[in-house]
Amino acid sequence: MLSISNWKVLAVDDEVDNLSLLTDILSFFSVSITSCHSGTEALAALEREHFDLMLLDIHMPTMSGFDVIKAIRQHPDAKVRDMLVVAVTALAMAGDREKVIEAGFNGYISKPLEVENFMLALQEITERQNAQSAAPSTDGAEQK
């Protein structure tokens, strides 16, 4: 089972109900969770503290999840730039998952959220990321 009890998670969604559901799910696993209602608020939170994981909605007013991930991946601080970011989104059409991954997200979970499927998807994403981080690169340098 996924061991995230010591993690600090930043959940970003403009819908209060979605943030409440994410908080309820993750609180069960004793995760420290910070909620933000906008991309701008999330980027400000990243300047104040380190998070192990960001769960980020795509469709938000003013600053979309795509704008946020672009800012994160270009951030001067490697802890921010290399942070695990998972899209939690209603984008569920053919090709949307690929578009999200190409934009720089580490994973994709579609809404509506079901607790068991959400946790299984999160476990798969984190295990894949951990395996990629541990694998040596072909040029002898460590992968991120």
Image (cartoon, grey):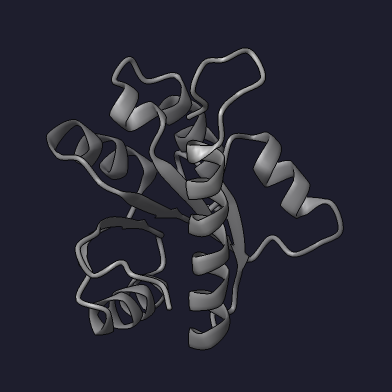
Q: Is residue 12 above or below residue 21?
A: above
Name the residue: 41% across, 68% down. 15
Residue 30 visible in the shown view: yes
Report which quarter residue 109 is drawn in: bottom right
Image quarter hosting the N terminus: bottom left
Picture residue at 51% right of the left edge, 58% below the top: 127
One can see residue 36 in this view: no
Q: Residue furthest left?
A: 48
Q: Nearer the viewer, residue 34 or 32?
A: 32
On screen, residue 88 above or below 106: below
Q: At which x and y percent is residue 7?
A: 24, 59
- Place residue 136 in its image quadrant: top right
Q: Position of residue 79 (x, y in %)?
A: 30, 30
The answer to whether 84 appears left or right of 11 in the picture is right
Residue drawn at x 35%, y 81% as measured from the top left: 25
Q: Is residue 78 above or below residue 26?
A: above
The answer to whether 12 appears left or right of 140 in the picture is: left
Q: How many marks?
A: 0
Spot occupied by residue 100 in the image (x, y as percentages of width and height): 66, 45
Front-lying residue, 83 or 67:
83
Left-right relation of 24 to 144:
left
Residue 96 drawn at (x, y percent) = 76, 52
Q: Is 67 left or right of 52, judged from the image as shown?
A: right
Give the camera-side residue of 103 and 135: 135
Q: What is the residue that sits farthest to the right in this orientation?
A: 94
Could you say which is closer to the camera, residue 100 or residue 128? 128
| Residue in view at x 84 percent, y 51 percent | 95
